[in-house]
Image (tube, rainbow, N blue to C red):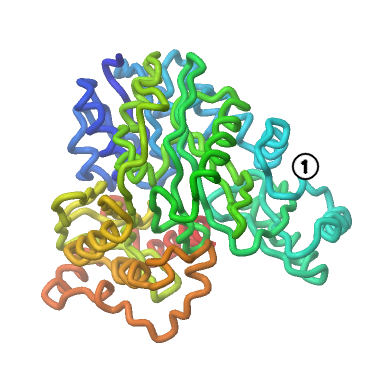
C-alpha cells in the first residue's frame, strides 16, 4: 500500500479522499491556493502545501508545480478527484513518467476515450449501442447539412472534445443549421481549444442513466449497478438516485453488459462511469465514459456497501478488486441533492461570499459530503457546489421523505443557495412518481415560483456579510475586477 498520497484537488472531494486515506493508514498531502489557506481540506490533511494564487491556472491546474511537489515530498501516488486533471491524458502521462502512481486509469485509456468521436467509433466496434450519427468530425457546413438531412431532424451538434453540457446545440430544421454550426464551433474552440464537432440524432425525452464500473490490472471487471441522473439544469446534474426506477431487470442486464464491454474496449482499470441515454422504450445509447470518480458516487456506495475511493486506492496500489460480482446486490434506495451557492430564480447565477451559518442535517440514513463550514468562503474562482446531501432508506418513497426532512434541517446563510429549488423538485408529483426525463427542469413552469426562503440573507447577518464582501481578500481584487472575473467564470462554466 502507499505511504503518502498527494490529492490534486480541493473542496468536498479532497476531504472525501483524505478520510479514505486516514482509514487506510496512508498519509494525505493536500494542496491549496491563496484563498483556500483555511479551507477544510487544507486543515484535515496530514500535510498541506501552498500551490499558487487563487486563479486556477496558477494553482490547481498548474501541472508542473503539482508534479514537482509530489516528487519533493516523496508522494507515492496522486489522486486527482474529479475535475481539474482527473481526465487529462497528458497530466497522467507526466505523472507516470515521474514514477508516481496515478490513482485512476492509464493515460492510454484516457486518450482512447477522450475524443467523443473516437469514443463513439470504439464503442460501435465493441458492440456498445451508440446514438445514430457520425463518428468523425464534420468538415464544413455543406457536408454537415447533407448528413443532418440523411439522419433526420432534430439533430444535436456536439463538440468532439466536449463535456459538462458545453459545446452542444439542438438543431430542429435545415434553416437553423448554418448559424448553429458556426456558433457551436466557436463555443467548442473557446471551451476546449478544439473546434471539431459532430452530429448525433436528437433523442426525444431521454433519461440519463449511467453505470458505475470498476476494474483492476489483472483483467477483472465489475459493475456496481446504475444511477439515474436526469434531473439537470444547463445539462449539469443536481439530483441523482440509485437504482433507477425506470430500469427493470432485463434492461439492467443489457446496460451493465454494455458498460463492461465499453470498459474492456479501452483496456480500462480503476473506477469509471459509462453514461447512456435511454429512450421511452428502454433503448439505450452510449453517451460518454467518465474516466474518474463521479460527483454522484455516494448513491452507489450506499446501495452496494462498496467504498469506491478505498477501492480506487487499493487497485492503484496493485491489488485485485476486493469483491466478486455475486457478492453485491442492490440494498435499498439512495438519493443525492447537490447543494449549490446559486440563485435558482436568476438563471442559476453563482452566489459568492462568506458562509455565516452552517449546520448540517444528521440522523439515520443521512450523509453529507462537504468541504465547507462556518466562515468558509465561496469564491468567484471555483465551482459553487457547497455539499452533497445523500439520503438512504429501504425504498424510494422513504428516501424521498428522509431527504425532505434533511433539506429542511440544513442551515446555510450568508450566501444564496438552491435548497428551496431542490425542495420544490422533490415535492413535484412527476418526480415522486419517477415520470421525468432530462428535460424535466426546462419544461417546468417556474414563473411566479417563490424561492425566497433559501435566498434571503438573515437581517442579523446582513451587516457582517456586507463587510465580508467589501474587503479585498487574498488577492486584493477590486470590485470592478471581481465582477469581471465572475462574469468570465460564468461564461466558461455555464454558458
Q: Along the horizontal axis of the image, is 461 left or right of 391?
A: left
Relative to 488, say whether 451 is above or below.
below
**Which residue is the site of mark 1?**
136
Q: Residue at x 47, y 63 (%)?
A: 233
Q: Along the horizontal axis of the image, is 46 left or right of 179?
A: left
Residue most toward the bottom? 448
- Where is residue 473 shown, x and y percent of the image? 26, 55
Residue nearer the viewer, 491 or 159: 159
Q: Residue at x 23, y 49 (%)?
A: 368
For label 1, count other residues whose C-alpha is less than 10 Å away and answer few (under 14), some (14-19) or many (20+): some
Residue nearer the viewer, 303 or 410: 303
Residue nearer the viewer, 426 or 60: 426
- Where is residue 397 shown, x and y percent of the image? 30, 61
Relative to 151, say whether 271 is above or below.
above
Q: Is residue 33 visible?
A: no
- Where is residue 334 shown, x and y percent of the image? 32, 50
Q: Residue at x 32, y 77 (%)?
A: 451
- Where is residue 340 shown, x and y percent of the image? 33, 60
Amino acid at each position: 500500500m502507499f505511504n503518502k498520497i498527494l490529492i490534486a484537488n480541493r473542496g468536498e472531494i479532497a476531504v472525501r479522499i483524505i478520510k479514505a486515506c486516514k482509514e487506510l493508514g496512508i498519509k494525505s498531502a493536500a494542496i491549496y491556493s491563496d484563498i483556500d489557506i483555511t479551507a477544510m481540506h487544507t486543515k484535515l490533511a496530514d500535510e498541506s502545501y501552498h500551490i499558487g494564487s487563487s486563479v486556477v491556472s496558477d494553482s490547481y491546474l498548474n501541472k508542473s508545480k503539482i508534479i514537482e511537489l509530489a516528487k519533493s515530498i516523496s508522494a507515492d501516488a496522486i489522486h486527482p478527484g474529479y475535475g481539474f486533471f482527473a481526465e487529462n491524458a497528458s497530466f497522467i502521462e507526466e505523472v507516470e513518467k515521474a514514477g508516481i502512481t496515478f490513482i485512476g486509469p492509464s493515460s492510454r485509456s484516457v486518450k482512447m476515450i477522450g475524443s467523443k468521436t473516437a469514443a463513439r467509433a470504439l464503442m460501435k466496434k465493441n458492440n456498445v449501442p451508440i446514438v445514430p450519427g457520425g463518428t468523425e468530425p464534420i468538415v464544413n457546413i455543406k457536408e454537415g447539412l447533407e448528413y443532418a438531412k440523411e439522419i433526420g431532424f432534430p439533430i444535436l451538434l456536439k463538440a468532439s472534445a466536449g463535456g459538462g453540457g458545453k459545446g452542444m446545440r439542438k438543431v430542429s430544421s435545415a434553416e437553423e443549421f448554418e448559424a448553429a454550426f458556426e456558433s457551436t464551433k466557436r463555443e467548442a474552440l473557446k471551451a476546449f481549444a478544439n473546434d471539431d464537432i459532430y452530429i448525433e440524432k436528437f433523442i426525444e425525452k431521454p433519461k440519463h442513466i449511467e453505470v458505475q464500473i470498476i476494474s483492476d490490472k489483472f483483467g477483472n471487471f465489475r459493475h456496481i449497478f446504475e444511477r439515474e441522473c436526469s434531473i439537470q439544469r444547463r445539462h449539469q446534474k443536481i439530483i441523482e438516485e440509485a437504482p433507477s426506477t425506470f430500469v427493470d431487470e432485463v434492461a439492467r442486464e443489457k446496460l451493465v453488459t454494455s458498460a463492461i464491454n465499453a470498459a474492456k474496449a479501452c483496456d480500462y482499470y480503476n473506477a469509471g462511469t459509462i453514461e447512456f441515454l435511454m429512450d421511452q422504450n428502454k433503448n439505450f445509447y452510449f453517451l460518454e465514459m467518465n474516466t474518474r470518480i463521479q460527483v454522484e458516487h455516494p448513491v452507489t456506495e450506499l446501495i452496494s456497501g462498496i467504498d469506491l475511493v478505498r477501492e480506487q486506492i487499493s487497485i492503484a496500489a496493485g491489488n485485485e478488486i476486493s469483491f466478486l460480482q455475486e457478492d453485491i446486490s442492490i440494498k435499498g434506495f439512495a438519493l443525492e441533492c447537490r447543494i449549490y451557492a446559486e440563485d435558482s430564480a436568476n438563471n442559476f447565477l453563482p452566489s459568492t461570499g462568506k458562509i455565516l451559518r452552517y449546520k448540517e442535517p444528521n440522523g439515520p440514513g443521512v450523509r453529507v459530503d462537504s468541504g465547507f463550514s462556518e466562515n468558509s468562503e465561496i469564491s468567484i474562482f471555483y465551482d459553487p457546489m457547497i455539499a452533497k446531501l445523500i439520503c438512504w432508506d429501504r425504498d424510494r418513497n422513504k428516501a424521498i421523505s428522509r431527504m425532505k426532512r434533511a433539506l429542511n434541517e440544513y442551515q446555510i446563510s450568508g450566501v444564496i443557495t438552491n435548497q428551496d429549488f431542490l425542495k420544490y423538485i422533490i415535492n413535484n408529483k412527476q418526480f415522486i412518481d419517477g415520470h421525468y426525463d432530462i428535460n424535466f427542469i426546462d419544461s417546468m413552469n417556474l414563473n411566479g415560483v417563490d424561492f425566497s426562503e433559501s435566498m434571503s440573507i438573515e437581517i442579523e447577518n446582513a451587516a457582517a456579510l456586507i463587510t465580508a464582501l467589501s474587503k479585498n481578500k487574498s488577492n486584493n481584487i477590486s470590485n470592478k475586477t471581481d465582477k469581471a472575473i465572475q462574469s468570465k467564470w460564468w461564461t466558461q462554466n455555464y454558458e
